[in-house]
Image (tube, grey):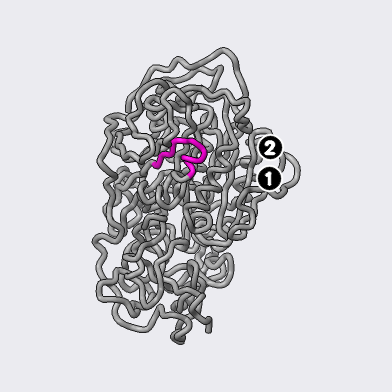
Amino acid sequence: MVRGVCSLALPLFVSANSILHNPETHVPRASSGCGSSSPYSAGKTSTASGTYGGVKYQYRVYVPTSYNKNTPTPLVTQHHGWGVSASGEEKGSGITTYAEKYGYIAVYPQGSNDNTNSGGPWYSWNAAGTTLSPNPVATCTAQAGTNSYCYTSCESGGKCNDKPQCWWTTCNNEVTPTGTGYSDVTGFVPSLYNTLESQLCIDTTREFGAGESNGGMFAYQLGVDMASRLAAVVPEFGSFHLGHNEAPKTGVPILEFHGTQDTTVPANKSASGDGYFYTTVQDIYYGGKYNSKGWRSSNGCSGSPSHYPTSYDGQYSLYCVSEGSCTGGDVVRCSWNGGHNWYGNNPTSNGGLVSEFLMKWTKTSHVGYGCTEGESCADPEFLEDVTLLEDEVEEIVGAGWETTLSSGSHFADPKDGCQDDEDVIDLGLGHICSYKVSTVGVEDVTGIPIANCSIGGAAPVENNGCPNDAKVSSTSKAFPICLAKGETDDPYTNGEFHCVLVCPCDYDEVGACGEEAHAHCPGTSTCQRGELRHRGQGVCTYSKATSLTV
């Protein structure tokens, strides 16, 4: 990392809260890169790499065609989910599409991949308690913990040896050394913002953060740790782990959304379908027992919740609520009729909802490099060895997986009838015949039901309690896992466990699982996202449009 000279402190103090952006009266602040030639070509995405703390990272930068080296331009970063590359995130999130409409620079950082176990790629973000269990509580059930989720950066000093082993991301410094807390905000992403400010003409009052799933957890953490810098954040179907909820020390407008069918990182329950514990949106916004006052308090909100109108109201049953009148910027929660996936299951809808909210805001107090007007400013850190690349280097989803399924009749289309040991469960945008797993008691500490299977997993495991047969091709790399999935919105607590087929999900040009992914699934079923924490994988499911539930 490289430190630079900062001389941005000014004598006049203004509030560090965000305010609504008025294009007619807005006065932008120019970053240090204004006037310099851009290393990134306008109208296209460039791939670059840089080093922080001895770790080499990649990121993608899209500069809009309207970019002018003398005109300060907004900056939006979109952070990928667990197992998704920066390239895949650009395709699926839809942020680049709206960079042209709103005239902002879109950046896709790529998190660490330092896990040598089967099941990758393992691109991840260290945030919101992903590597801090069990303090103050375990962040997963005893059945969900696995050493295969332990990253190389977490192994030193006997880490990842707690039982259950709930750590599941890198331990590298990507916003703070522990991925949480309010101090030492000097990680990869803050340094990336500094580097981009020095390379491009950025409006420092209009820098934003967003992300999905594990990247949504990271977007929450950025809102906390970079509160004096970011004008607004949008965590997409993310959360804090239970016990690690935090709120910013100054106002940061926030819009979060979840699908009503999301059991992977649920909005209103703690236990996920794969046995991890999260913080409900209610506690994130209003505070809970683990020392957070809540985002609503940080943003100075008062009064009763009310409908928050967007241009997407009613589409995919979207409905948003504002948590009162807030002096530090709106605090908004939204729901839509979907699972653990981008809003509308498509990049156009997702990118539109995210961008519309972000572009409403400005933080006039931010003068650059994370420094607030009127306060002393520490020397900023920059990425080292910044290099433009030909293209992003990424792993192939499913590389190294062995074929595990044999020919048989499980996981079939419900219209053809299910086996006696199966139920019909809704999955993704469809449904499937799914092996029903019994329970064998409850955990002593949590009282959570114990399933007669191994919960979750990102790679094939023998004898995990699921049937290993389906009508798939001889080259299929689909494999069964056990999840809490059933008819209720809290299936883990209610002991509803079923087996599903996981398929490697490469991205097509609209961010969906492509034809190669579908080929791993049985019959006419397709590979779809929306059920798994590993966003580089999907589940095999049959369309209800051509199937009859029996």
The image position of residue 72, as x and y in percent, is: 48, 26
Query: Which residue corresponds to mark 2?
Result: 326
Q: Is residue 99 magenta?
A: yes
What residue range appears in magenta?
A: 98-108
The circle on residue 140 is none
Can residue 176 be seen here?
A: no
Q: What element does badge 2 sit on?
A: strand
Measure the C-alpha gap from mark 2 to mark 1. 8 Å
Occupied quadrant, residue 18: top right
Bin the neighbour count of mark 1 within 10 Å (Cα to Cα): few under 14, some 14-19, many 20 and up.
many
Task: Determine contact: label 2, label 1, CB under 8 Å.
Answer: yes
Q: What element does badge 1 sit on?
A: loop
Q: Along the horizontal axis of the image, is 227 left or right of 454?
A: right
The image position of residue 484, as x and y in percent, is: 49, 68
Q: Residue furthest right?
A: 303
Query: Which residue corresponds to mark 1?
Result: 323
Occupied quadrant, residue 163: bottom left
Three-letter code for the amino acid on which mark 1 is drawn:
Glu
Instruction: Decide which of 40, 497 is in the foreground and name it.
Output: 40
Picture mark count: 2
Q: Is residue 68 magenta?
A: no
